[in-house]
Image (spheres, helix red, strand yellow):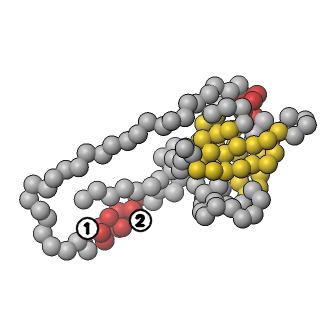
Amino acid sequence: MVIVVRSDSYFGDYLNDESRERLVNLIVAAKTGNAKPNPKLEPLSSEQPQWKQKTVSAEGLNLFVGSYAFPAPTPANINTNFTIKNLDGGLVIDGLHYAYRFRLLPLDDKIFFVEDINLELSFDFDKNGRPINPRIRKSD
């Protein structure tokens, strides 16, 4: 049996060891039947991303720090309002997907990969060079 617990692995938020242990114990207690002797183990595989991260200057990244809103309606499980913050020289997005926080990895000067949830966040720029019109789409 493999149990995967989704957590905010970068920031240590939303982890409650007591709740997690209680859930695992409930799952184990609810199992029916005996375990198979010598079960076949299936190796896990992962694909390398098709995108390539670009290096963007701190000044370029700081342009995106702020609060934004998508035009309604938004895709399922995506909040309308979100905030981009600078953290340790990179960007994180707060409030996009439930209460989780994700790193933003620059793909070019106005497109970011939202780490862990396979989305791309893109912007236009206004006449003053500020990001506007955020858009979200599933990454290829």
Q: Is residue 121 visible?
A: yes
Task: Please name whichever residue, 106 or 10, is drawn nearer the observer in this view of the structure.
Answer: 106
Tell me the amino acid under the disc marked 2: Ser
Q: Are marks 2 and 1 in contact (CB under 8 Å)?
A: no
Q: Which residue is mark 1?
A: 28
Pick the quarter of the image with the C terminus. Answer: top right
Q: Which residue is mark 2?
A: 19
Task: Please name whichever residue, 137 or 93, is drawn nearer the observer in this view of the structure.
Answer: 137
Residue 86 occupies quadrant: top right
Pick the quarter of the image with the N terminus. Answer: bottom left
Circle 2 SS class: helix
Give x and y (percent) for residue 126.
87, 40
Give x and y (percent) for residue 4.
37, 56
Task: Please name whichever residue, 34 or 11, is drawn nearer the observer in this view of the structure.
Answer: 34
**Picture residue at 67% right of the left edge, 45% below the top:** 121
Q: Is residue 67 visible?
A: no
Residue 108 occupies quadrant: top right
**Picture residue at 75% right of the left edge, 56% below the top:** 70
Farthest residue toward the left?
37
Give x and y (percent) for residue 54.
62, 28
Q: On residue 125, which mark appears?
A: none
Residue 78 occupies quadrant: bottom right
Judge from the rendering whether residue 120 lies leftward or rightward of residue 5; answer left or right: right
Circle 1 SS class: helix
**Which badge, 2 or 1, comes first in the chain's sequence?**
2
Up-down: is 39 above or below 48?
Answer: below
Tell me the amino acid under the disc marked 1: Val
The residue carrying pointer 2 sits among few (fewer than 14), some (14 to 19) or many (20 or more) residues within 10 Å by Cα, namely few
**Picture residue at 69% right of the left edge, 61% below the top:** 74
Judge from the rendering whether residue 138 lies leftward or rightward of residue 135; answer left or right: left
